[in-house]
Amino acid sequence: MDIVIGLLIIAIGAFCQSSCYVPINKIKDWSWESYWIVQGVFAWLILPFLGALLAVPAGHSFTELFSTVSSFNIWMTIFFGVLWGVGGLTFGLSMRYLGVALGQSIALGTCAGLGTIMGPVLLNIFFPELNALESLTFAVILGVVVTLIGIAIIGVAGSMKAASLSEEEKKAAVKDFNFPKGLAIALLAGFMSGCFNVGLEFGKEINFGDLTDPMFRTLPATFLVTLGGFVTNMIYCFYQNQVNGTWGDYKKTAVWGNNLLFCLLAGALWYSQFFGLALGKGFLTESPVLMTLSFCILMALNVVFSNVWGIILKEWKGCSQKTITVLICGIVVLVISCFLPQLI
């Protein structure tokens, strides 16, 4: 029963993440770079910091968290957060050229597979005494492979969509639709986004051990990863403010109330995925396979829900029944990938 609860919590977080772009559509009179960094203040700084505080038991302080592990692990956690930040930037571009459904599917699918594999591999390189590769069991590899198969099927549906629709129909669904360009950007975004889980692996001991509730143990590492990502995004967004002359966005006091509200909502929905991941893993401790695969499962469910939003937003409107059937098959395979390893 605990496993079902854990997967359900992760699924709720995935649904929230897949919905985080909906509030952004309500933001007024701000350029992309302006609202992106403001929502990032909530998504990558304030909310992760508050989450990390939950890992601090009574009688201890937040700063003590970082005395429990080596400075090398702390800086590596932040470093991979910086790399993940690059993935976050290109992630947004992938949806610009492919739409919410297809863009998230390809980027998150790549992120799911690489994020799951890269963590243990890099830990084994730096700390061979930990035997991190032992976590990559047959069941884990199978789960990753099945996830990637599901993503590939959805990718096929995307290529069928690109081939079957006229340019006018593509633009009606996704204004700047460009499958080749979007595919390249989505793959890059997925590769760099996979660094998030690598950062979590390096920072997984940043807690107070048995004194920290299992549901909150990964939240301090999550904060350090998002902190690194915030730095990357801040530099890029401020650069774009300078290049595009959009510093004036922050002076538009008439829209601050509206925009701040929806940036907060978007940031909260985005952070929910990793807050849900932390809480969900607290219920998966009896299954080492699902613990290792939890990040992959989160990404797979993100893809499932992003395609649901894609259907709601009519991004697949005008596609043939065959294309929709292929899309649904891919979604079903992704759902199966979440439970299959537990049955091995």
Image (cartoon, rainbow, N blue to C red):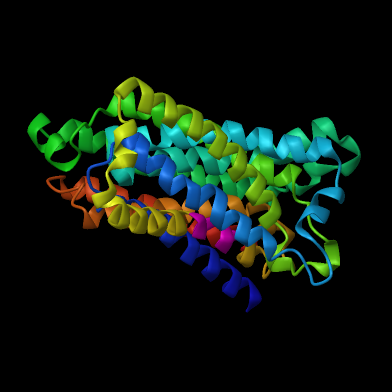
Q: Does the magenta stretch mainly form a helix, a strand or a loop?
A: helix
140 part of magenta stretch = no
The quadrant of the image that shows the N terminus is bottom right
Q: Quick one: which residue is furthest to the top in this view?
A: 243
Residue 114 appears in the rendering = no
The residue at the point 66 percent across, 45 percent down is: 224
In the displayed structure, would residue 344 be above or below residue 67?
Answer: below
Q: Quick one: which residue is furthest to the right in this view?
A: 129
Residue 243 relative to residue 56: left or right: left
The residue at the point 60 percent across, 33 percent down is: 82
Magenta range is 271-277
| Rendered location of residue 318, percent (x, y) | 12, 46
State the count of labels.
Answer: 0
Residue 245 relative to residue 331: left or right: left
| Rendered location of residue 249, percent (x, y) | 30, 38
| Rendered location of residue 255, percent (x, y) | 26, 51
In the displayed structure, would residue 109 be above or below residue 182?
Answer: below
Residue 172 appears in the rendering = yes
In the displayed structure, would residue 156 be above or below residue 60?
Answer: above
Query: Which of the 4 quarters of the picture holds residue 151?
Result: top left
Residue 121 relative to residue 195: left or right: right
The quadrant of the image that shows the C terminus is bottom right
| Front one among 260 and 327 | 260
The residue at the point 15 percent across, 46 percent down is: 320
The residue at the point 68 percent across, 38 percent down is: 78
| Rendered location of residue 325, percent (x, y) | 26, 52
